[in-house]
Image: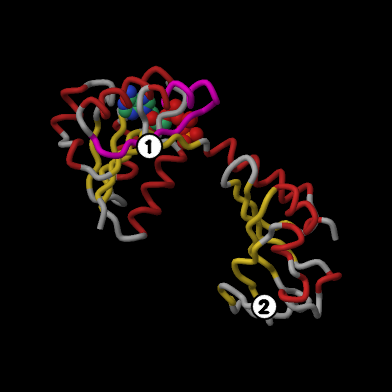
Amino acid sequence: MKEFAIIGLGRFGTSLAKTLVNLGHSVLAIDSSEERVQQISEIVSHAAQADATDEEALKALGIRNFDVVIVAIGQDIQASILATIILKDLGVKTVIAKAVNELHGKVLEKIGVDKVVYPERDMGNRLAHALTTSNVLDYMELTPDYSIEEIVVPERMHGKSLGNLNLRAKYGISVIAIKKPGGCLIPGPGADSVFEPGDVAVVIGTRKGLKHLEEK
Ligand code: ATP
């Protein structure tokens, strides 16, 4: 079980804290607002009111003993940057920070944050893909070139096997899993797996290759 600390209990920080607790992890939730701390105190293992730009306050909470600290302060960019610098200086092994824009993210990277997350940008990206293509259900960008997509298998592929379709050789696409209409999942389907109407394929590939699948 990993020990997490989350600083900033806005919508993102709160949602992250609740999910980590549901997954069985111990979470220390920190916010400068007493009200926010009160609201989350019944859900997480520990909650504390503290200003994350105050090094002594963070030290007093034993912050350096946590495996991962997530800085989920968004609007107050100065506080987000100061808190991140303090955490890295204190020797916290893994610091993850939320950025509200590209410039904020670049600064966080320059000061040595281990990972920057852009929840608003990424969610907007995913929704845009789902809205503008008729058969893409979900989308995750791995790099600017490679993505994973959950896609309704187009009619032209019904009744055909993976071996027959040869998607990897033709388009550089690998099928990771097939979800059957009843909810049954076939992980790592073999060449003899046949696509049926209603199937959803989880695929990985290049932007260009995936575009081919998106065309019905
Ligand atoms: P979300 O979009 O996730 O709701 P947000 O990007 O709007 O969040 P804010 O609301 O600005 O982010 O900040 C999230 C939380 O961070 C707030 O509850 C705020 O009280 C807290 N916060 C801001 N500055 C500090 C600080 N210096 N120390 C501790 N907590 C802070």
Picture colour scheme = secondary structure
**Amino acid type at mark 1:** Ile
- Within-10-Å neighbours for mark 1: few <14, some 14–19, many 20+: some
* Displayed quadrant of residue 21: bottom left
Q: Secondary structure at mark 2?
A: loop
* Displayed quadrant of residue 24: bottom left
Tell me if 176 is positioned left or right of 57 in this view.
Answer: right
- Identified at 65% across, 63% down, the residue is 174
**Marker count (numbered):** 2
Residue where numbered disc 1 is placed: 96
- Position of the C terminus, as image quadrant, is bottom right
Residue 154 counted in the magenta span: no
How far across and down, in percent of the image, does residue 50 sit? Answer: 24, 28
Q: Nearer the viewer, residue 51 or 134?
A: 134
**Amino acid type at mark 2:** Ala
Q: Which mark is residue 42?
A: none
Q: Which mark is residue 191?
A: 2
The magenta segment is 92-108
- Identified at 24% across, 49% down, the residue is 3
* Displayed quadrant of residue 73: top left
- Within-10-Å neighbours for mark 2: few <14, some 14–19, many 20+: few
How far across and down, in percent of the image, does residue 80 sit? Answer: 38, 24
Q: Secondary structure at mark 1?
A: strand
How far across and down, in percent of the image, does residue 32 sit? Answer: 30, 27
Q: Nearer the viewer, residue 8 or 173?
A: 173
